[in-house]
Image (tube, rainbow, N blue to C red):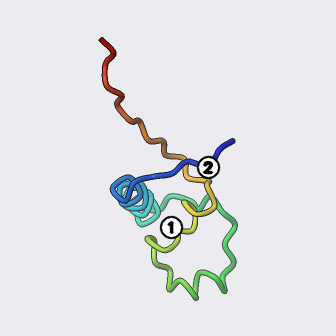
Amino acid sequence: MAKMTYTKYERARLIGSRALQIAMGAPFILKISEEDLKKFAYDPIKIAELELEKGVLPITVKRPFPKRM
């Protein structure tokens, strides 16, 4: 599967949405050690960035395409 390239706006939306889920108690998708969690200071945004970087986010991006004539 080809790696998706996101715009800075899509990245911000993906990370923000996932960070909110994590902050509300959603389980992590990646196995993260207690040591790594302490290194991230339990920051949901950093955890969401890591999940995005690894390509495991359960969120998709729909891009509207122009209509053909």
- Up the image or down, 31 lies above or below 43; here it is above
Give the spatial CA distance, label 2 vs label 1. 15 Å
In primary-sequence order, the first of circles 2 and 1 is: 2
Image check: 68 left or right of 36? Answer: left
Q: Which numbered dot is residue 3? A: 2
Residue bearing the label numbered 1: 49
Q: Where in the figure is residue 12, as x and y percent of width and height? A: 36, 60
Q: Name the amino acid type tagged 2.
A: Lys
- Taking the image as shown, residue 61 lies to the left or right of residue 69, namely right
Q: Position of residue 60 (x, y in %)?
A: 48, 42
Name which residue lies at 31% across and 19% down.
67
Q: Residues within 10 Å of mark 2 (few under 14, many from 20)?
A: few
Residue at 59 percent of width and 62 percent of height: 28
Amino acid residing under circle 1:
Glu
Give residue 48's position: percent from left, percent from top. Answer: 50, 65
Q: Nearer the viewer, mark 2 or mark 1?
A: 2
Judging depth in this view, the residue of 3 and 15 nearest the camera is 3
Q: Residues within 10 Å of mark 1 (few under 14, many from 20)?
A: some
Residue at 53 percent across and 83 percent down: it is 40
- Corner quadrant of residue 68: top left
In the image, residue 66 lies at what x, y percent?
A: 31, 25
